[in-house]
Amino acid sequence: MHRAFYHEHPDVLTLETDVVESLPGRVVLARSPFFPGGGGQLADLGEVRWPSGEAKVAGFETIDGKPWIVIAGDAEIGGKVEAVVDPAFRRMMTEMHTYTHILNACVYRSFDGALVTGVQMNEDATARMDFDLPDADNEKLRALEAPINAAILEDLRVGDSYVPLAVAQAEPGLIRTRSVAPPPTADGMVRIVEIAGLDRQACGGTHLSSTRGEKRVRVIKIDNKGRHNRRVRISLV
Ligand SMILES: [Zn+2]
């Protein structure tokens, strides 16, 4: 079964690996530690290093099923390389991403299974989540800050597992929205991320191994985005 390296080895951020295909300014690696972005989580920053040089990672593109890593400049690399994920950025994104699950769980529970309509995490340690909440009281949404931080302090275990797509689609609430659910793996499985006792949903991002990260969450703004959508902006503090 195909599993992403960044899911199987989330703590391995520096990896020696082989180039399997190369063009000027882009490369496919035998194994890649980089999270390529998706589900509202920004792609990793990092570098590729080889004996005679190094280049910053500039982006990720899957073409004909091949996961190309785009690098700055036009070097054409072969042989062994070192792939290096920027640890601080990954850490921030991972923590923010885990906290968006907690926000999502609190909204889901407090507002009768309300679904996510969009999510975006930002470089400046803020994020926004949009929810389908036509009649929500914005003060009630703002008040979720306390239970979110309580769940962080509880240090709940976060784990993952894989279920067949049909099983995932049959379990209410597991796929909160198409905009955050990951595409199935090549063998038709969906990755499920579970925060013990709090939340269980399909997700393809990176997460803490338990909820107590370094930072806490502040709800900084609630916006009405159309008649149905509420946009909740949070920040790491
Ligand atoms: Zn997630």
Image (tube, helix red, strand yellow):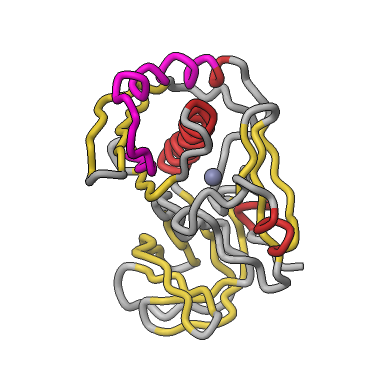
Q: Position of residue 126 (x, y in %)?
A: 31, 35
Determine if the magenta segment contains residue 143. Answer: yes
x 60%, y 45%: residue: 173
Seen as rendered, the residue at the extreme front is: 135
Left or right: 225, with 90 as reference point: left
User: In the image, which residues are magenta?
Assistant: 128-150
Q: Ligand 1 is located in which of the four quadrants?
A: top right
x 54%, y 29%: residue: 109
Q: Position of residue 8 (x, y in %)?
A: 69, 52
Q: Position of residue 81 (x, y in %)?
A: 54, 66
Could you tell me which quadrant the C terminus lies in? top left
Q: Which of 180 and 211 lies nearest the eye of the viewer?
A: 180
Q: Which of 9 and 192 lies nearest the eye of the viewer?
A: 192
Determine if the magenta segment contains residue 65. Answer: no
x 37%, y 82%: residue: 24
Left or right: 103, with 167 as reference point: left
Does residue 77 sit above or below 181 in this rendering?
A: below
